[in-house]
Image: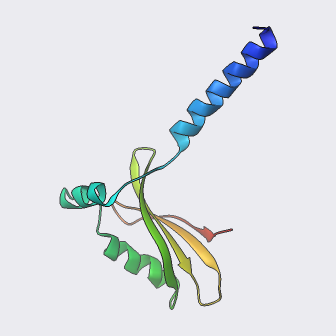
Amino acid sequence: MTVSARTARSLLLALLVFCSLSAARDLDQDEAFSLRQQGIILPLEQLLHSALGRYPGATLLEAELEEKHDRYEYEVELLTVDGVVREIKLDASNGALLKDEEDD
């Protein structure tokens, strides 16, 4: 193997490791239920009320619980009355707003 091939292979491996570390992991309903029962996360219904309150009349498109950087986050997608899709991220443990932006 040549030096440039080894360098390219090393860079590819480093990129794969970085991507796997930065990616969020979606939790299934059993994991979410267990975390809720343990008091680690707030109920989705409570945080949905908060998210929908930001955009009165909006329609819920999707809600997911993710584990990202050792934190649980609810990712909520809403369709506003103006026809804009918003992506809202909330800290699942305390409801703090992490992100609110137009989704592309």
Q: Nearer the viewer, residue 93 or 45?
A: 45
Q: Residue furthest left?
A: 37
Q: Residue at the spot x=19%, y=60% of the render?
A: 37
Give me the residue at 34% from left, 62% from top.
94
Q: Eyeballing the image, is 9 above or below 74?
A: above
The quadrant in which the C terminus is found is bottom right
Judged left or right of residue 80, residue 9 is right
Q: Residue at x 52, y 69 (%)?
A: 88
Q: Is residue 33 above or below residue 24?
A: below
Q: Which sits in the foreground, 30 or 100?
A: 30
Residue 5 versus residue 40 in the image, above or below: above
Say left or right for 4 vs 43. right
Q: Position of residue 71 (x, y in %)?
A: 40, 50
Residue 91 percent location from the top left of the image: 41, 60
Tell me the quarter of the image containing the N terminus. Answer: top right
Number of numbered discs: 0
Quadrant of residue 38 within the rendered picture:
bottom left
Identify which residue, 22 or 91, lies in the foreground: 22
Q: How are the colours assigned in the image? A: rainbow
Q: Residue 89: x percent and y percent?
A: 49, 64
Q: Quadrant of residue 81?
A: bottom right
Q: Which quadrant holds residue 28?
A: bottom left
**Is 36 drawn above or below residue 67 in the view shown?**
below
